[in-house]
Image (cartoon, coloured by chain):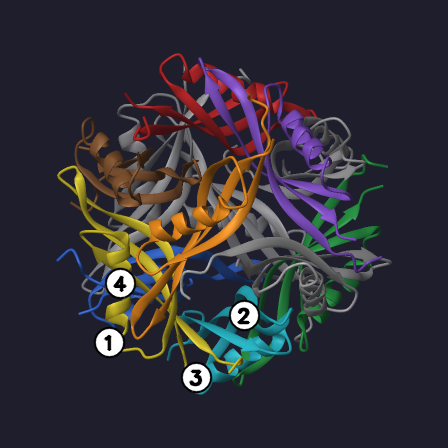
Chain colours: B blue, D brown, E yellow, F red, G cyan, I green, J orange, K purple
Amino acid sequence: MSEHIYKVVELVGSSQTSIEKAIENAVSRASTTLKNLDWFEVMETRGHLQGGKVAHYQVKLKVGFRLE
Amino acid sequence: MSEHIYKVVELVGSSQTSIEKAIENAVSRASTTLKNLDWFEVMETRGHLQGGKVAHYQVKLKVGFRLE
Amino acid sequence: MSEHIYKVVELVGSSQTSIEKAIENAVSRASTTLKNLDWFEVMETRGHLQGGKVAHYQVKLKVGFRLE
Amino acid sequence: MSEHIYKVVELVGSSQTSIEKAIENAVSRASTTLKNLDWFEVMETRGHLQGGKVAHYQVKLKVGFRLE
Amino acid sequence: MSEHIYKVVELVGSSQTSIEKAIENAVSRASTTLKNLDWFEVMETRGHLQGGKVAHYQVKLKVGFRLE
Amino acid sequence: MSEHIYKVVELVGSSQTSIEKAIENAVSRASTTLKNLDWFEVMETRGHLQGGKVAHYQVKLKVGFRLE
Amino acid sequence: MSEHIYKVVELVGSSQTSIEKAIENAVSRASTTLKNLDWFEVMETRGHLQGGKVAHYQVKLKVGFRLE
Amino acid sequence: MSEHIYKVVELVGSSQTSIEKAIENAVSRASTTLKNLDWFEVMETRGHLQGGKVAHYQVKLKVGFRLE
Amino acid sequence: MSEHIYKVVELVGSSQTSIEKAIENAVSRASTTLKNLDWFEVMETRGHLQGGKVAHYQVKLKVGFRLE
Amino acid sequence: MSEHIYKVVELVGSSQTSIEKAIENAVSRASTTLKNLDWFEVMETRGHLQGGKVAHYQVKLKVGFRLE
Amino acid sequence: MSEHIYKVVELVGSSQTSIEKAIENAVSRASTTLKNLDWFEVMETRGHLQGGKVAHYQVKLKVGFRLE
Amino acid sequence: MSEHIYKVVELVGSSQTSIEKAIENAVSRASTTLKNLDWFEVMETRGHLQGGKVAHYQVKLKVGFRLE
């Protein structure tokens, strides 16, 4: 159990409403093609501005999953 | 179009309720004096504590805008 | 007043719902044993995934408090 | 449109002539297997030396592409 | 002479052809409104991709100038 | 020869006995699906504790391999 | 009161005598054009050498001030 | 279970023989006064030299433990 | 002797007069409750401004002491 | 062959025309006194400005060479 | 005694067997030409892969020695 | 004039009295064997503690000098 190997992929999720939603969007997308998703780490939080407002948040995150 | 020049300014926004609101407060204030705001990047997230609770969130961010 | 000394401790708070709630959980726990909590700084934002969803957010933060 | 998800891959391109050519070589190779390439970020610039001269430049870069 | 004060501003220049040209475009634009430009430092090198090729290089740089 | 392109993947290997064994476990697993493995770089060394002892070492590493 | 917005500018101060004096020179100059200066952060400490001695210290600092 | 709070302490362990032994020495010492030790992270690896040889390895690590 | 274990605590000292005095104030306070203080490392140098002048320097430092 | 030892020296090269030329100037100078130059890594890219233009690029690089 | 001056050199040691052996190889080589070696700090741990296995570990380290 | 090459060496200076004096001691020692010293950059500020007081400040700095 303690000698698992994990792979880590980097994703950018976005959301018009919140940082958490941007993370969840990226994780949700990853789960459509990857199994055994185990943890994430936020690398950068940024976003686009339009009309003097936040148009959407963008979160770059690493997602780790266990290789079988 | 691809040879635009941008300027980047650093701001600290604060909010009693959330990290997103602190970002939006800073962006909103910037938009009163700057045009063509294009993106932001979060540099630091911190805050003050009072009475053992978060009094307000403070987010240091960079805001980029296109020079005309 | 200007020559106060502060101590800084590192904590990890977690929450099933948001980054802010993870911060507040850590600060709330710290306030049960430490007085004069003054500020916090977010060091890392990460979390665990289960069933292709965020199971909980984990925020590593530093909390500063004034020594008497 | 604002809730796209991107994946980021890390590549090392090399070139005997310039940093830009090393970047372009890596991007060109990536485009043979990945669609919707959107941006790159340079992570490291280095290279090998032979006979007291630059034998080739090596640029480690991240390349982001939109997931469909 | 040795007690000059400098201000540092952050800019992003872009160019379809090279990293150097992106730097020079930013410096050239800065020189239209700022005097006594003295040095620059490259902070990030990135760019946009279109059709599997580099559409333009973007260089984030700091530019220092002497205050009078 | 000097214009090779490499891809870099991020893995976490673990071992109950040593940092080197955690690295070797990750590399060994990568070699089952990737050819032309060329170098690795250690990014983080950490581990889990149980009963006041190191239960296993975890090493996050990047592994580079040549694309054909 | 807790929802103030701050702007942060980057300056380089110099002094022939000390790091503190270089900081104070930059702050003093900033105060001639900016109001509500609130804090500073040292980013880099460096200097020029002449005749095998320190000719002057140069401190790059960020200065934050409250926007009204 | 998912809303645990952890505290993180920083230690330096040393050993004449290996990096792993330096980590284990620090963890072992921590376990004499702290319960629920959960993970460690290596921050720095260094050491002293005597007579042109490694006299001992020193590893600075963070150790996290669950607060009850 | 070579297998000592050290603990590292983080403090912020402040002083109206100098960076060194802020360090010494923090160390002096630490010595009232901790024995065997061995070294310090400066992490951040910052301060508050009032009336366009440095009101006080604040130095965040780590202090290491030997556990018995 | 696999147990070579390398030394790494830090240099700053400059050029009026390009980043690559600044690197090559530094490498060329190093090769006049050092043998077995093997690789370089770019640490910083900066430069001086005169008359609102880049006067010269300065690249700080590390150069590694094999010890015999 | 407390006003010693040290010089720091950067080396890369390699070993087919372990990280510690790579460090010791570099230190041993340094001791053939430098006296008063005092400490080392690990900067990077990496290595080459051949045939899907670690061919050798490479450790970049700084070595400090006292100038007389 | 603009195509000079510089070498950068790393030193640690120490002083019982101040950070500036530790820098000056290192620079002064460097000037006994190196010509054309041009600039320095502070990398780390630390020190030893004895009897609950600062025994001496240690400053790790890089010193750049022009190669002829």
Tags 2 and 4 touching, CB below 8 Å: no
For residue I43, say whether it is visible.
Answer: yes
Q: Is residue G15 above or below residue E9?
A: below
Asked whether the residues under marks 1 and 3 belong to the same chain, the reply is: no
Task: Pinpoint residue G68: horizontal percent, then vertical percent.
Answer: 37, 80
Q: Residue under label 3, please give it.
A: G35
Crowding at dot 1, Cα within 10 Å, few <14 / some 14-19 / many 20+, comes out as: few
The picture quadrant where one finds residue G20 is bottom right
For marks 4 and 1, give the one nearer the viewer. Answer: 4
Count of residue discs: 4
Q: Disc 4 on helix, strand or loop?
A: helix
Question: Could you tell me which chain the residue with mark 4 belongs to?
Answer: E
Q: From the viewer's perspective, is residue G24 above or below residue E15?
A: below
Relative side of F14 to B37, left or right: right
Q: CA distance from mark 1 to mark 3?
A: 26 Å
- The residue pinned by badge 2 equals G59
The tag earlier along the polypeptide, 4 or 1, is 4
Q: Do discs 4 and 1 share a chain?
A: yes
Callout 2: SS: strand
Q: CA distance from mark 2 to mark 3?
A: 21 Å
Mark 2 or 3: the one toward you: 2
Expressed as whole percent of the image width and height from the top left, the position of residue J4 reads 58, 27
- What amino acid is labelled 3 in the image? Lys
Report whether residue G5 is seen.
no
Report which quarter residue G1 is drawn in. bottom left
**Percent of width and height locating residue E10:** 35, 65
Please tell me whether residue J63 is drawn above or below residue E61 in the rendered image: above
From the image, tell me which residue sits under label 1: E32
- Please report the residue visible at 18 percent of the width from the left and 52 percent of the height from the top: E16
The residue to which callout 4 is attached is E24
Which chain is indicated by disc 2? G
Q: Quadrant of the C terminus of chain D?
A: top left
